[in-house]
Amino acid sequence: MAQENIFPYREGNLWGLCDDNAKVLVAPKYDAIKKDRSKGTTFFEASLGNSSGVYIGSKNVIPVEFQKLQYVSTNLIIAVKKVVDKKEINYLYNTKGELLINQPLSYLKGIKGNDKRYDTTFIIGFYIKDLEGKESLVNLDYYNDNKLSYVLKDVFSIELDNKKSKEELAIAYVKQTATSAVETKYFKVEESRIILLDNKKDSQYIQENTGPKKKKEGYNNYEDNIAVPNIDSEMVVEEPRGYSGTGEGNNKISSLKRIPQSPISYYKYALKDNQIEIEVSNNVKKNVKLVKFPVKTDKIEVFKTKGVITDEKTIADTLKTYFNYIIYQKKNKFGLAYQFPFQKSVEYDFLEPMKSEKKYDSGSKNYFKVGVLDKKTKTMKYGVIDVNHTFILPAEYDEIKMGYTITPSFKEQVFLVKKNNLFGLVSEKKEIKLPIEFESITFNSESPSFLRVKKGNQHSAYISYYSNSDYVLTLLPMYYPYPVREIKYTISSGKKGISLLEAIEYIALEDENKNFKGYANPNGTLYFKD
């Protein structure tokens, strides 16, 4: 039986819950409802005023009456209620909403093991104090569905001796009543269980593990399954969080061309006293010389290449590899050269190296934005060339930007192009990714895995998702009244042949001021009403 999909539902300023057909399951009555998939696919934290609680699906499992919810380890919640005189009462739940200790507590502190091989957030038990001041030590068996058992129950006081306790053994001083004598108790941990030792039956183990510390043999000097509770250690409290992603990687290895084993000469340029300093090196020697640039220029600049540029000549005794190129200006014309000996370049009305709009872009090709001025209209039209002056995109656009690839593994460079105040996407192979018909195409700064698009007053997204061992690039099938803030993919989004509607769990929307507006289905269903 398929699990029901449930989403936070907004009506005006109030929140409830609905199914994927926008059928209301919990009437909107809360100030906020947060979906936290890390705690479960249908885990929601609801808040009203200063009070919070938890829903699992459409069932309210932790009442919305607590002033604080502390998320401990990966599956525990301490619900705190403030009463008169600013006192706090604590309740211990798991993330299924089950009350683990069936009584209110005035104090509650998590106990972690000291075994450094395990996650420091691993909680093995709790030291608790009830409203009457009675103290207990409870064991929480992580591997047995958080089964709770009392190691010590309802005693007057428990004091752990952190100075004498060791990795193999914990020592505590216990008073059963206010007037009783102090008893020394010994504990050890096996797997995730705190075990109270019998002073007589376990006397040999106690004797062997008290006194001077003995160095252990083996990995990192730790026993295979030993850890001790540390009541003084701080609990690690987690805030609810959500995740977004685009699927799985494809682990493909790109095909490599075998480079002929010819001698290689390396060329580096630097500008010195209006001349070009050329450094030529190979495996044997290095020569440096100054030469005049053969073209009379008003301005000349030397740039580092992205990667290196290697001459691809079919017949050559020596391969030439270049680490720099030169852009020069002569009056209102611009040229580009990298090969030595230098020659006059094809000249353009505008020329500049292109930089990716993405912060991280693994593209390794050197591309240049060039402009050609229309003498009749006095307008500049832009295109893209490579270092050899080959046009990648023709000079016919009002604007061009680079770096609009959205697949996690880089395949090809994609350019944003503008014509007649509308935008589109074109690849370096001249393939139209999106037609030039959008008012805007922009990155979401918080999620570079998709591009936000706008047509008229409607919004959508250009996305990539993983299917059939590759990434599928497509526009969402529907438009929404607000910009796309986040796209959450299902766990099964990498399955073979999965459709777009199956790959996406939900879409989150926000207004132009980045205020969260609500959730939507990829089929266009909105889970909110303004």
Image: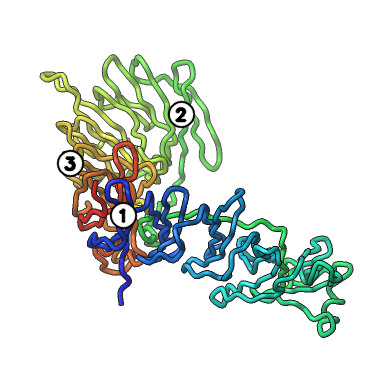
Seen from this angle, which residue lies furthest bottom?
Answer: 201
Query: Considering only vertical position in the picture, is 304 above or below 157?
Result: above
Which label's residue is closer to the chain start, 3 or 2?
2
Seen from this angle, which residue lies furthest front?
Answer: 84
Disc 1 marks a residue whose amino acid type is Pro
Would you name the residue on which mark 1 appears? 28
Which label's residue is closer to the chain start, 2 or 1?
1
Closer to viewer: mark 1 or mark 3:
1
The one nearer the camera, 430 or 385, is 430
Q: Left or right of 250: which side holds 226?
A: right
**Residue 159 at what x, y percent from top left?**
78, 64
Q: Is residue 224 visible?
A: no
- Cα separation, mark 2 vs mark 1, equals 67 Å
Quadrant including the N terminus: bottom left
Q: Is residue 457 visible?
A: yes
**Residue 231 at what x, y percent from top left?**
71, 62
**Element marked by disc 3:** strand
Decide: marks 2, 1 in contact (CB < 8 A)?
no
Query: Considering only vertical position in the picture, is 195 above or below 398?
Result: below
**Residue 448 at what x, y percent from top left?**
36, 46
Closer to viewer: mark 2 or mark 1:
1
Would you name the residue on which mark 2 appears? 269
Residue name at image x 61 percent, y 72 percent: 140
The one nearer the camera, 162 or 249, is 162
Residue name at image x 31 percent, y 54 percent: 28
- Cα separation, mark 3 vs mark 2, equals 47 Å
Residue name at image x 65 percent, y 65 percent: 130
Residue name at image x 37 percent, y 62 percent: 250
Would you name the residue on which mark 3 appears? 455
Disc 2 marks a residue whose amino acid type is Tyr
Q: Residues within 10 Å of mark 2 (few under 14, many from 20)?
A: many
Q: Left or right of 471: which side holds 199?
A: right
